[in-house]
C-alpha cells in the first residue's frame, strides 16, 4: 500500500524544514519535504540571521545569495527607539536611544573576532523562496507544497505517514526511515501527544506587512529595527516595532516594512478586530499624519508563548524549529535556533543511515539541542519583559493621569539640567537591552560537552557570562571550534571554512605525516569522511590567533564534528590512531 519510500520525510516547508532538505541533499541523503500550504510564507516574519547561522549556511553555499538579497551591513547595524514617527507634541519625533546591534558599530570588532560570517538580514518572505529553490534544485521532485500530513504510525524499522494532496484530495502513503517535524507544531507534535512545557500564550502579536515611504520620519539609515514608544492622548505608552524589509532599498528608504505590536489578554483578540481597526491603532501609535499613504499587504496574528517540547524525539520522529520551541521574537532567536536544530540533526541522520554511526547517536539530538532551546526561550521571555520595563525610565507611569505622563515626557526632552539628568538616567535603562541585541555569548556560546557525544580531555569550561554578552572561544571538546583566520597560498581562510558537509575535520598543528595516515585508516574503518588540514604546512597562522586558541602544543590536533563542534583534542602523541579511534567512537556513538 506504500506509494513512496524515502529515507527521511520532512513535514514543514518553513525555514527549518527547507534548510533540513538542503542539508540532507548535500549529505547525500534523499528526502521528501511536504508542506500543507501552496507556497512559502507571504509574511516577512523573522529576518535576522546571526553569525552562527550564516556560518552554517555558508558551508552549504547559501550565504552569498542571502547577503546579496538582504540588507547591506550599513543598513542593519543599529537599534533605535523613537517616541513617534509623526505628531507635534514637544515629546514627539524624538530619539529615546540608539545603539549598535547584532555586530554593528561598537560591537563590530567583538563579533568579527568570534566569527568569520557577519549577520544576515532578510525576511522569511524572501528567504524561504530562496531556500525552496535551492532545495528543489538539489532534490528534484523532493519538495511537495500543498500536501498535508494526516496520520503517523511507526515501528522498529520506520515511519508510515498518510498525506493528502490538498488540491486534488489524492492520498499518498509514505514509508520513511525517519521523519523530521518542522511544521511549527501544527500536526506532528499533536499527533504524537508531545506537550509543550513552559509559559503558555500570554500575548497576541499582530504583524502588518505594509508598503510605505517612512523616510521623512526617520533620521537614521542604519537601524535593523526601529521601536516606537508613543504617548497616547489618554496618557498610555503604546509600542510598535517598525522594521525595514527592503527588498530593493534598505534602511529608512525601504519600500516595505513590518509593523509589530502586541495585544495583551483581556480585550478583543487581534482576530476579532476588523482589519480597519488594527490599521487605525497602528497609525495612532505611530502618529502618522491623517491620510499619509500606507498600503497594507497583509495582516497576521500569532500567539506569543515561551514553551519547549517535552521531547524532541519520539522513536524515529524528531521535532525542530517552532515544533520544538516557541517564544517571543525578542533577540532574533527563533529562526536561528530552528536552522541550527536542522544542522545538528541532519549530519547525525546521515551518519546513521550510512552505517557510519550507531543508532544511539540520534539520542544526541535531544540531549544537545533541548538545553539550548530552554536557554533561548528563557532569554527571549526575559528580553521581552525587559523591553517593556525599560519604558519606566521615561517617567511615564501606567494608570497615572494623562497630564502627569505628558509632563514627564516633556521634561525628559527639556534643555535643562533636569532634562539632561533624565536622559542620562534613561540611557542606563536602555543599556540593559544589550541582553537582546548584543548577546554574542548566547548566540555562539552554547556547548554540548555534557551530552555524551564528545571525548572529554579533562579541561574545565571557560566561565560563562550570565548576561550572555561575552563569548570566550575555546577548543575544549563539546564546544564550537574557535574561529581564526589562517592563510593558504597567501589567501585568507577561516577555520570554519575548512569544514566540508558530512565530513569530520582533523586540524593538526606542526608535522602532520602521522596524522594523515591515521586519518586515512580511520576514515576507512569507520566508513566516514575525514578532511585533514595542517597548520604549519599547508596553512599558516600569521598572527598567532589559532596557536593561542587551539589549547594544545605543536604536534597535537583537534577532531571536529561535521557540525563544527570539537569531538576530541590532544597534544603531541605517539599514537594518533588511538586518539582518532577514541574520538570517532564518542562522536559517532560506536560501541564495537
Image: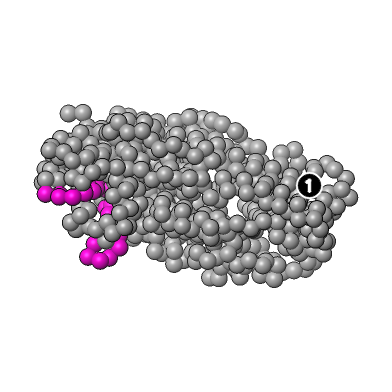
Crowding at label 1, few (<14), some or many (≥20) Cα neighbours within 10 Å? some
**331 left or right of 157 in image:** right
Q: Is residue 496 above or below residue 295?
A: above
What residue is drawn where x is 48% and y is 45%? 470
Residue closer to the observer: 265 or 476: 476
Task: State the SS at label 1.
Answer: loop
Q: Foreground: 397 or 458?
A: 458
First to last magenta residue range: 488-513
Q: Is residue 344 left or right of residue 400?
A: left
Image location (x, y in percent) of residue 572: 18, 41
Please tell me which residue lies in front, 400 or 66.
400
Kindly identify which residue carries mark 1.
395
Is residue 275 among the parts visible in the rendering? Answer: no
Residue at x-position 39% and y-position 32%: 367
Q: Is residue 512 visible?
A: yes
Residue at figure coordinates x 53%, y 58% from the top left: 106
In the picture, the quarter occupied by the N terminus is: top left
The answer to which quarter of the image holds residue 398 is: top right
Residue 199 location (% of width, % of height): 60, 33
Residue at the outermost front position: 417
Residue 450 on image: x %, y %:
36, 31
Q: Is residue 143 magenta?
A: no
Question: Who's the residue at 74% across and 57% down the image?
Answer: 83
- Residue 183 or 559: which is nearer the viewer? 559
**For residue 148, above or below residue 225:** above
Amino acid at each position: 500500500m506504500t506509494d513512496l519510500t524515502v529515507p527521511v520525510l520532512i513535514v514543514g516547508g518553513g525555514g527549518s524544514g527547507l534548510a533540513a532538505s538542503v542539508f540532507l541533499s548535500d549529505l547525500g541523503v534523499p528526502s521528501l519535504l511536504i508542506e500543507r500550504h501552496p507556497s512559502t510564507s507571504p509574511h516577512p516574519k523573522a529576518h535576522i540571521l546571526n553569525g552562527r547561522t550564516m556560518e552554517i549556511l555558508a558551508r552549504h553555499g547559501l550565504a552569498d545569495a542571502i547577503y546579496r538579497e538582504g540588507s547591506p551591513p550599513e543598513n542593519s547595524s543599529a537599534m533605535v527607539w523613537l517616541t513617534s514617527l509623526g505628531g507635534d507634541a514637544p515629546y514627539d519625533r524624538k530619539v529615546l536611544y540608539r545603539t549598535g546591534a547584532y555586530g554593528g558599530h561598537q560591537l563590530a570588532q567583538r563579533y568579527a573576532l568570534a566569527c568569520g560570517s557577519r549577520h544576515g538580514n532578510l525576511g522569511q518572505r524572501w528567504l524561504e523562496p530562496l531556500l525552496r529553490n535551492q532545495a528543489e534544485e538539489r532534490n528534484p521532485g523532493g519538495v511537495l507544497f500543498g500536501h498535508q500530513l494526516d496520520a503517523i504510525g511507526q515501528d522498529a524499522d520506520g515511519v508510515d505517514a498518510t498525506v493528502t494532496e490538498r488540491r486534488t484530495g489524492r492520498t499518498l502513503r509514505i514509508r520513511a526511515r525517519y521523519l523530521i517535524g518542522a511544521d511549527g507544531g501544527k500536526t506532528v507534535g499533536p499527533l504524537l501527544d508531545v506537550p509543550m512545557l513552559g509559559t503558555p500564550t500570554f500575548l497576541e502579536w499582530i504583524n502588518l506587512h505594509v508598503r510605505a515611504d517612512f523616510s521623512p520620519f526617520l533620521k537614521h539609515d542604519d537601524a535593523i529595527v526601529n521601536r516606537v514608544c508613543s504617548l497616547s492622548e489618554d496618557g498610555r505608552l503604546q509600542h510598535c516595532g517598525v522594521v525595514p524589509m527592503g527588498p530593493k532599498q534598505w534602511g529608512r528608504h525601504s519600500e516595505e516594512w513590518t509593523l509589530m505590536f502586541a495585544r495583551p489578554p483581556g480585550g478583543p483578540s487581534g482576530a476579532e478586530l476588523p482589519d480597519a481597526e488594527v490599521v487605525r491603532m497602528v497609525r495612532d501609535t505611530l502618529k502618522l499624519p491623517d491620510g499619509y499613504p500606507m498600503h497594507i499587504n497583509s495582516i497576521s496574528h500569532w500567539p506569543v508563548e515561551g514553551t519547549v517540547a517535552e521531547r524532541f524525539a519520539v522513536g524515529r520522529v524528531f521535532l525542530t524549529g517552532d515544533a520544538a520551541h516557541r517564544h517571543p521574537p525578542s533577540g532574533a532567536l527563533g529562526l536561528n535556533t530552528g536552522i541550527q536544530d536542522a544542522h545538528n540533526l541532519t549530519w547525525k541522520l546521515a551518519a546513521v543511515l550510512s552505517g557510519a554511526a550507531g543508532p544511539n547517536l540520534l539520542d544526541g539530538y535531544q540531549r544537545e539541542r533541548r538545553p539550548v532551546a530552554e536557554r533561548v526561550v528563557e532569554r527571549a521571555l526575559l528580553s521581552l519583559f525587559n523591553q517593556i520595563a525599560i519604558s519606566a525610565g521615561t517617567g511615564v507611569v501606567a494608570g497615572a493621569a494623562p497630564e502627569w505622563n505628558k509632563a514627564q515626557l516633556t521634561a525628559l526632552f527639556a534643555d535643562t539640567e533636569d532634562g539632561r539628568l533624565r536622559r542620562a538616567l534613561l540611557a542606563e535603562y536602555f543599556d540593559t537591552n544589550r541582553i537582546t541585541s548584543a548577546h554574542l555569548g548566547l548566540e555562539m556560546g552554547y556547548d554540548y560537552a555534557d551530552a555524551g557525544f564528545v571525548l572529554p580531555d579533562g579541561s574545565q569550561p571557560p566561565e560563562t557570562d550570565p548576561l550572555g554578552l561575552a563569548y570566550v572561544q575555546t577548543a575544549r571538546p563539546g564546544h564550537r571550534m574557535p574561529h581564526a583566520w589562517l592563510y593558504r597560498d597567501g589567501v585568507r581562510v577561516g577555520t570554519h571554512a575548512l569544514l566540508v558537509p558530512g565530513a569530520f575535520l582533523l586540524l593538526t598543528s606542526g608535522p602532520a605525516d602521522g596524522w594523515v595516515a591515521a586519518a586515512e585508516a580511520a576514515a576507512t574503518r569507520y566508513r566516514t569522511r575525514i578532511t585533514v588540514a595542517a597548520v604549519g604546512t599547508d596553512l599558516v597562522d600569521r598572527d598567532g590567533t589559532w596557536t593561542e586558541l587551539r589549547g594544545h602544543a605543536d604536534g597535537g590536533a583537534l577532531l571536529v564534528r561535521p557540525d563544527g563542534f570539537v569531538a576530541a583534542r590532544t597534544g603531541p602523541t605517539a599514537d594518533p590512531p588511538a586518539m582518532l579511534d577514541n574520538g570517532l567512537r564518542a562522536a559517532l556513538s560506536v560501541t564495537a
